[in-house]
Amino acid sequence: MKKVFAFCLGIFLALVFSLLLVNFILMPILTKRQKVVIMPEVVGLTENEAEDLLRKAGLEIGEKRWAFSLQYPEGRIIAQEPRANVKVKKKRIVELTLSKGRGKTVVPDFSGRGLSEFLEMLMRADLSAKVETVYGEEEGGVKTCIPSPGTLLEKGSVVRVLVNQKEGFVLMPRLVGLKLEEAKRVLDSLHLVLDEVREKESEEEAGTIIFQYPEEEMRIRIGGRVVLVQAKGGVK
């Protein structure tokens, strides 16, 4: 009986010694012999570009995830694990997160909302706001927004919020390319005055606006005067 016990104990001790030998002697030696590489930066690259770079560095591609991103377009790498510029062993598995694009969101309805509340709604919808003043009797209220409520947009898009102001400025719209009558309607809607219409030789169809002052996106006071130049032959 004692011999059997001694035999079993000997086997147990041999197994323990073997494990210690592997864990504390052999594995560190093998690990040190593995070549170390610097983890490349792949964030911002396409999926194929990232995979080629990682394989050339002797690394392996692991699990891929997808997430929405306002910064990177669809298909670009937005995160990596391990992070860039750290030392890793060759054949290390690298996990990548790819962009699904910005994602879609809907322009909220401003009806019955104050300006600050509507701006907060836009922010929650992952939309940016560009506030502009236009002539209106109810000063400070939201007159409209462009694009209109219910429009499906990419997250991060800009929504123009037009706010009523009795005395204020508007951004000059683009009139070049419009016919004169249509340009007049746009100016009337913004409470701007058509001061003068000139004509000039042009390859454009007669009556088409070929120049405007103030130019597009310039600020102009409500009631400000506008000069238009149309292709020669149009009706003044």
Image: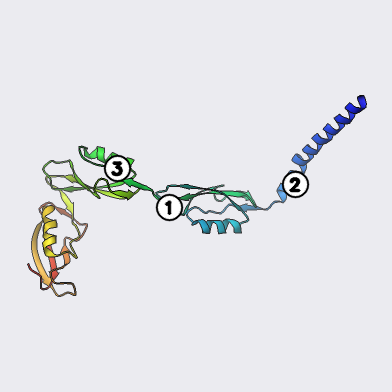
Looking at the rendered structure, the secondary structure element under dot 3 is helix
Quarter of image, res 108: top left
Q: Nearer the viewer, mark 2 or mark 1?
A: 1
Q: Where is the N terminus found, in terms of image quarters?
A: top right
For marks 1 and 3 on the same chain, the one whose residue lies earlier in the sequence = 1
What amino acid does circle 3 point to? Answer: Leu
Q: Colour mode?
A: rainbow
Q: Residues within 10 Å of mark 3 (few under 14, many from 20)?
A: many
Write the residue at 71% across / 48% down. 32
What amino acid does circle 2 point to? Answer: Ile
Judge whether 204 appears above or below 96 on screen. below
Q: Percent from the top left, x then y, of residue 121?
A: 29, 40
According to the picture, the residue beneath numbered tag 1 turns out to be 72
Write the residue at 31% across / 45% down. 106
Cβ–Cβ under 8 Å for marks 3 and 2: no
Badge number at residue 122: 3
What amino acid does circle 1 point to? Answer: Tyr
For marks 3 and 2 on the same chain, the one whose residue lies earlier in the sequence = 2
Write the residue at 81% across / 35% down. 15
Q: Can residue 64 be seen at all in this image of the molecule?
A: yes
Q: Disc 2 to disc 1, how far (Cα)?
A: 42 Å
For marks 2 and 1 on the same chain, the one whose residue lies earlier in the sequence = 2
According to the picture, the residue beneath numbered tag 2 turns out to be 29
